[in-house]
Amino acid sequence: MSKAKQKMLGIKEKRELQRRTVVEAAAKLFSQKGYAGTSMLDVARALEISRPALYHYFVSKEDVLTTLVKEVTLYLENVGDSLTADGSRDPAETLYEMTRKNVLFILNNTVMFRVVERSENDLPEDIRRLNDRAKRGIYDRFRIAIERGIETGHFRKVDPAVAAFSIIGLCSWSAWWYSPDGRLIPEEIADQVAMMGLESVRASDGKSINLDELRPAIADARKSLERLSNLFGKN
């Protein structure tokens, strides 16, 4: 690779890194002040740069929000695409991995995910259609994985639509109760939620339930419910 090409790649990588910094700063402000209550000047001040310098990366806060939608919703749709494209793949493995990757991404990007969820009504019409289409795509991938599992006997005969929405809800709600200061790291939480999602549809093998194995999960669920109760109590 020539030095000129290496230099161009370095400039491109630096620009993408700077754009990412702007997106993260804006997402934090959107979360704190609301999308409508945040201006580009607020973002520039948070980054300690001039407004003209900020416009070098984004022309408006709508442009920033559009980037957030693409980084969150479109990414999650692509996760489903990559896992459901191969129809011969084990349905249980597909559903587990899809759920796990969704949760892991959400836990590592909670602020951005919350902002997209809260700001859907503020999206420009074309971006709102893009976001709606991507969300429909996420649902379709989960539904397809569940339908395949039912057809192959891996899953019980549940309503695929209800099951898909329920598991997506498990994934999405993690953004609202997860705490980085908790005792479990994102990977451990993602594993547990993925297993819970899978077990909600997996066909019974006739084995008895081991309550000792379930007790840690029950304890974690109780703590999550207590945290949710406290959150609602503060609102």
Image (cartoon, rainbow, N blue to C red):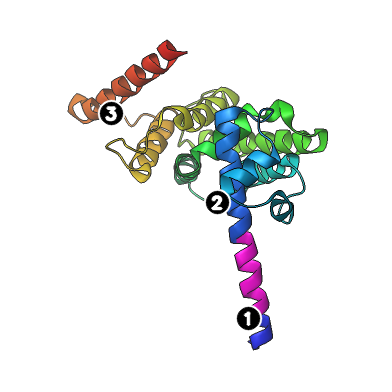
Residue 155 in the image, given as x and y percentages of width and height: 46, 32
Mark 3 against mark 1, which lies toward the viewer? Answer: 1
What segment is highlighted magenta in the picture? 7-16
Is residue 85 visible in the rendered image? The answer is no
Q: Determine which residue is flagged by label 1.
A: 6
Q: Determine which residue is flagged by label 3.
A: 217
Q: Quadrant of the N terminus?
A: bottom right
Closer to the camera, 80 or 151?
80
Q: Secondary structure at mark 3?
A: helix
* Amino acid bearing label 3: Ala
Q: Determine which residue is flagged by label 2.
A: 88
Q: Secondary structure at mark 1?
A: helix
Closer to the camera, 42 or 94?
42
Mark 1 crowdedness (10 Å alpha carbons): few <14, some 14-19, many ≥20: few
- Which label's residue is closer to the chain start, 3 or 1? 1
The structure residue drawn at horizontal position 77% and vertical position 38%, both measured from the top left corner, is 127
Number of numbered discs: 3
* Amino acid bearing label 1: Gln
Q: Is residue 174 left or right of residue 70?
A: left
| Marks 3 and 1, how far apart at CA | 50 Å
- Which label's residue is closer to the chain start, 3 or 2? 2
Mark 1 against mark 2, which lies toward the viewer? Answer: 1
